[in-house]
Amino acid sequence: MMRPEYAPGQAWTYRTRPGDDASRVVIRKKEIEAEDGEVFHVSLLDVKLRNHRVPGGIQTAMHHAAVARATLDQSLLECVGDADDDETWMDGYAVWRQAYDNGDAGVFDIPVADILGYIEMVVASSGEG
């Protein structure tokens, strides 16, 4: 089997959590890092992410996550075309970039569905804010 060619601007279906069937992964940027190799910066759109900090308690997008190729290989199913050129992800990327350069952030290497579950757990443990 050939390795998929992941590129910025692509939108993909992926192995979703129950209820997130309409969700898509959008590849925003690809970088090569000395420590982590290929790092893909992605947005997760049309998700149902439980978050007590947003009105209604459901966040519908995670605009930035830094992921390894392994995450994409484990998760992505089909490229469904080009994504919008929304730049909302860039704020999250800038925060990640600074933290990563300072040794305070990393790169996810788990499936996308597990990333969403992890984020929900972290938000829930942060209290009712």
Image (cartoon, rainbow, N blue to C red):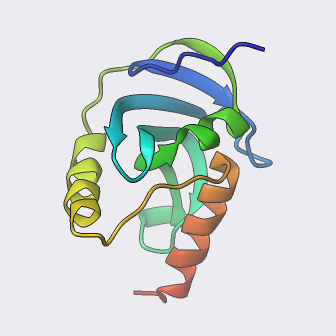
104 or 90: nearer the viewer: 104
Q: Nearer the viewer, residue 33 or 16?
A: 33
On screen, residue 21 versus residue 23, left or right, reads right
Residue 62 visible somewhere in the drawing: no
Farthest residue to the front: give it. Answer: 34
Viewer-proximal residue, 96 or 14? 96
Q: Residue at x 34, y 47 (%)?
A: 34
On screen, 96 above or below 23? Answer: below
- 36 to the left or right of 115: left
43 relative position to 31: left or right:
right
Q: Residue at x 53, y 77 (%)?
A: 122
Q: Is residue 124 visible?
A: yes
Q: Quadrant of the N terminus?
A: top right
Q: Quadrant of the C terminus?
A: bottom left
Residue at the location (30% across, 22% down)? 85
Rendered location of residue 3, percent (x, y): 65, 18
7 to 113, vertically: above or below: above
Residue at 56%, 37% in the rendered image: 69
Please say if 97 is above or below 11: below
* Quarter-of-image position of residue 120: bottom right
Q: Tell me which corner region of the image, top left, top right, bottom left or bottom right, holds residue 7.
A: top left
Q: Quadrant of residue 101?
A: bottom left
Measuring from the top left, give residue 112's x and y in whole percent. 63, 47
- Expressed as whole percent of the image width and height from the top left, the position of residue 15 reads 75, 38
